[in-house]
Amino acid sequence: MNSELILVNITGADRIGLTAELMEILAKYDASVLDIGQADIHHNLALGILFKTDNKKSGDIIKELLFKTNALKVQVSFSVISEEEYNDWVSRQGKGRYIITILGPQITAKQISAAAKVIAEQGMNIDTITRLTGRIPLDESEKPKTKACIEFTVRGTPRNIEEMQSNFMALSSKLNYDISLQEDTIYRRSRRLICFDMDSTLIKTEVIDELAEKAGVGDEVRAITESAMRGEIDFTESFTKRVALLKGLDVSVMKEIAENLPITDGLERLMEVLKRSGYKTAILSGGFSYFGNYLKQKYNFDYVYANELEVDSEGKLTGKYLGDIVDGKRKKELLRLLAQVENINIAQTIAVGDGANDLPMLSEAGLGIAFHAKPKVKAEASQSISTTGIDGILYFLGFKDSYIS
């Protein structure tokens, strides 16, 4: 049998049953569908169908499709595809696929153009573009409350993936939006464990600074904290010095601080969706277990690992801590341990943090996200969120508002 490969492109106003009516014609002539894709943008349809048929039937199929599309008031075009073109297309399906997510309070043409240019420079082709967020408000007063996110599915092998990642990170800073580049593997679609830093990640403060204010040593402790988070001094050394300055503080102040913690925007939404979707969640913190356990109870985290402050018989902090310090190295170890406990591949893990001591776990996780991070951390991280609340993580995981609203 002599066969033909025909590509049909249909555009116009969408309506219920349109695809079904067109496919009925192909079914009538026993055509084989080799590829099909459809998108709907503001009630306007773009439908492509590549089919194979006996060349004796192709004329009748085209004629009936012309009559039907005219009746449906949509536009149609036909292209004959050679076997060589088809085989070349098939060979490209084996190339790598990447997901590029861009996220911000709003997405502009300038931002999309810049991202698309980087993709093209790497010799890669955009297969699909999908909007993950809901409607974009026209009222300017509403925009500060919203997020905008689109996702590119890109095919090909980057000429230099490190350069591509670096260019994206530079764009995110220059144009004030966040860009995620992830290889589209089975693991990306089956993340199961997400581990968070606590201070300046789940909450908008460093708890040790809050304790220091109550102890009257706020300036001294804050200076050490900031130096440590910038990676200028060793975390263990800085932690020991800061805890020592808390000596004599009444333990009762911890309850007051916990009940007034400034929670990071979007945390409640993030945790509700993660738990509903079956994720295991953990707090791995260089802060203190009292506050980690408070958040665990409030937001239903599965695990908490943090530092334990020593308290004397009179209910005062001794200026010492119990057990090993949860520093950057320990966070990385705990991430691997929890992956083993949950019986998952390390590629199925996510880590989120803001400070230099989070970098080991960010680099170890299948997906490491620097959240509103210090410049040094953002520069070394593969993924970063700086323009939205912590629920922006959901879009990097591929969630759509229509799934989770």
Image (tube, rainbow, N blue to C red):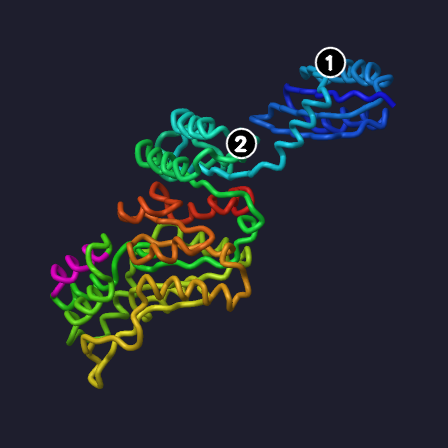
Q: Is residue 130 left or right of residue 141?
A: right
Q: Secondary structure at mark 2?
A: strand
Which label number is shown at residue 15? none
Which label number is shown at residue 70? 1
Look at the image and give the residue range highlighted in magenta.
217-228
Q: Secondary structure at mark 1?
A: helix
Circle 2 sits on which residue?
Answer: 129
The secondary structure making up most of the magenta span is helix
Q: Is residue 307 above or below residue 110?
A: below
Crowd class of label 2 (few under 14; some 14 to 19; many from 20; radius 10 Å): some
Quarter of the picture holding the N terminus: top right
Q: Is residue 181 visible?
A: yes
- Inter-mark Cα distance, 1 to 2: 28 Å
Q: Is residue 38 left or right of residue 329?
A: right
**Which one is in front in this view, the residue at disc 1 or the one at disc 2?**
2
Q: Quadrant of residue 316?
A: bottom left
Q: Position of residue 250 (x, y in %)?
A: 19, 75
Name the one closer to the observer, 278 or 233. 233
Which amino acid type is shown beneath numbered disc 1? Asn
Q: Position of residue 108 (x, y in %)?
A: 40, 27
Q: Residue at x 83, y 18 (%)?
A: 55
Q: Position of residue 180 (x, y in %)?
A: 43, 41
Q: Residue at x 11, y 66 (%)?
A: 216
Name the one closer to the observer, 120 or 14. 120
What number of labels is visible?
2
Q: Quadrant of residue 107?
A: top left
Which amino acid type is shown beneath numbered disc 2? Ile
Q: CB atoms at circles 1 and 2 under 8 Å apart?
A: no
